[in-house]
Amino acid sequence: MFKGLDKFVNATDFRKVSKWYIIVSLCLVIGTLAWGGYIFKDKIALTMNYHNIEEQAEKQGIDKSIQEQLGNLANSSADIKDVLLLDKDNNIIYSAKNSGLGKDNKLVLTKVNDKRQFFQDVNIPDTYFKVIGPRNVLLTKDVYRDSKDIKKEFDNDFFYDSNYNTQKIYFLNYFADRKNGMKVFIVNDLKPIPYAKVFIGFSAALLMLLFGLYWILVALWVYKDANRRKLNAPLWGLLILITNIVGLIVYTIYKQNNQTCYKCESLQNKHNTFCSYCGTRINKSCEKCGTIVTKNDTFCVHCGAKLDH
């Protein structure tokens, strides 16, 4: 039953296979990361600019000197509808893209429903703002709408399904200066990124493929090694195929607790004097009592006889 598998496994040089697996895997992963970096370059630039401004705001506070950086932030992604700088009375001091959000240069947001994170300015009734955390600044429409948890939240909101086609919903990141009450609003209109879904699907498939190949290669290597050492190769191969790293640790410990015949490479009990497969002497023993000794022993630990190495 296992003759065909034995023939295939024994003919396979797992050192070369492992080397090529690592090289090809690294090339594919690096290529995929480079592709992802190109696809999401705007989002990466947006994230870096966002955190730089946020860090500066925490250290130095928010004032009009931040306007240039807000302009750079607004231009770093096509998803950004506008970046607004507001004073403590919610007057719009600076609008990076002059989007016209707010009325009379003022934007006062109040919750639509106490249980939801949707806000609205009563003066612009057809527009809603969904507040998202700083970690979601990288979101795209593809990723956001495909997230099960967030989609469930959207589906459960009382107005989303009925009003989404007629009302405009923007996504809002913000941070504020507690000392002077000034605020920065980052208003996003999430748009699908070309090839984003293709990239996500390809990346997931590639990771599954590489992991699956690794899993199978480890099992086949253990099968070959166990077969070479005259062990139950199918049993050990199946164990590794089921448990992988846990089984590999058990197999390694099992080998270390025994010894390998240097002539036929079969695994032997560490107390054997002779190999049970080829008869080669694998341990030195006391000529008087037969106790196994090591090359560093001068006297037998059992009978005390002097050893002649």
Image (cartoon, rainbow, N blue to C red):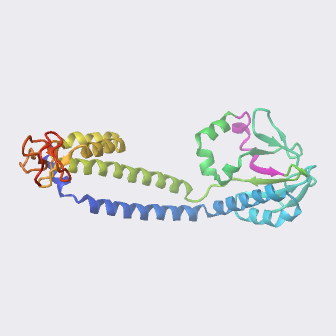
Residue 164 drawn in magenta: yes
Residue in the image at 15% along x and 42% along y:
304
Give coordinates of residue 265: x percent, y percent.
15, 52
Q: In this view, does 20 lie to the left or right of 73?
A: left
Which residue is drawn at the image coordinates 58% and 59% (left, top)? 194
**Image label count:** 0
The answer to whether 27 appears left or right of 139 in the picture is left
Q: Where is residue 181 in the image (x, y as percent from the top left)?
A: 89, 50
Image x and y of residue 229, in percent:
17, 48
* Residue displayed at 26% across by 58% down: 14
Q: Nearer the viewer, residue 186 or 201?
A: 186
Vertical relation: 296 (above or below) 153: below
Residue 167 quadrant: top right
Q: Quadrant of the N terminus?
A: top left
Q: In which quarter of the image is the C terminus?
A: bottom left
Residue placed at 71% from the left, 44% from the top? 165
Q: Quadrant of residue 262?
A: bottom left
Please report the bounds of the magenta region as a residue range: 157-176
Q: Tell which of 282 and 71 is nearer to you.
A: 282
Can residue 73 be found in the magenta stretch? Answer: no
With 22 as the anchor, is 237 left or right in this view? Answer: left
How far from the left and from the top, in percent, is residue 15?
27, 61
